Image: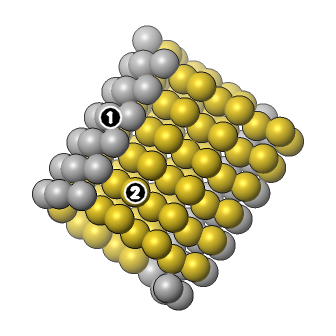
């Protein structure tokens, strides 16, 4: 469970779990489910649904063609260029959404929410 996980050019579903490790997924044609504690999560170019749950970690999603659901405690969430619905929840962290073609639901207890260009 300790360590870095990297997945590149995947045709299928990804389920990844780690503690104290970074998770990176690049060019995925399928659903992604990620759970981590104390780790950064980065997903780039995804054609499918993304579900992320983390505690103490930064989450970045770039160019996503599908629905995104993110839940975190103590972490920053950034989503860029998304074609689908976004649902993001954090307790202590900033949420930033840039260029979204779909509905956004964003909730934070202690943090700032920034949304740019929604269509």
Q: Report the residue at 76% width, 37% height from top.
A: 108
Q: Earlier in the sequence, mark 1 or mark 2?
A: 2
The quarter of the picture where residue 89 lies is: top right
Kind of element beneath mark 1: loop
* Residue 48 image position (x, y, % from top left): 27, 42
Q: Are marks 1 and 2 in contact (CB under 8 Å)?
A: no
Mark 2, residue position: 33
Task: Classify mark 2: residues with Cα within 10 Å, few (<14), some (14-19) or many (20+).
Answer: some
Front position in the image: 109 or 23: 109
Which disc, if any, is residue 66? 1
Numbered circles on residues, count: 2
The quarter of the picture where residue 100 lies is: top left
Kind of element beneath mark 2: strand
Is 97 drawn above or below residue 24 in the view shown? above
Q: Report the residue at 66% width, 53% height from top.
A: 72
State how far apart marks 1 and 2 are (Cα). Answer: 13 Å
Mark 1 or mark 2: which is in front?
2
């Amino acid at each position: 469970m300790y360590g870095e996980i990297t997945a590149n050019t995947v045709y299928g579903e990804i389920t990844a779990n780690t503690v104290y490790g970074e998770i990176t997924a690049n060019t995925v044609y399928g659903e992604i489910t990620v759970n981590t504690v104390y780790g950064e999560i980065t997903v780039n170019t995804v054609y499918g649904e993304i579900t992320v749950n983390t505690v103490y970690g930064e989450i970045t999603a770039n160019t996503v063609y599908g629905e995104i659901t993110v839940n975190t405690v103590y972490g920053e969430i950034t989503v860029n260029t998304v074609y689908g619905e976004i649902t993001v929840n954090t307790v202590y962290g900033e949420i930033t959404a840039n260029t979204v073609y779909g509905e956004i639901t964003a909730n934070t207890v202690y943090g700032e929410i920034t949304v740019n260009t929604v269509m």
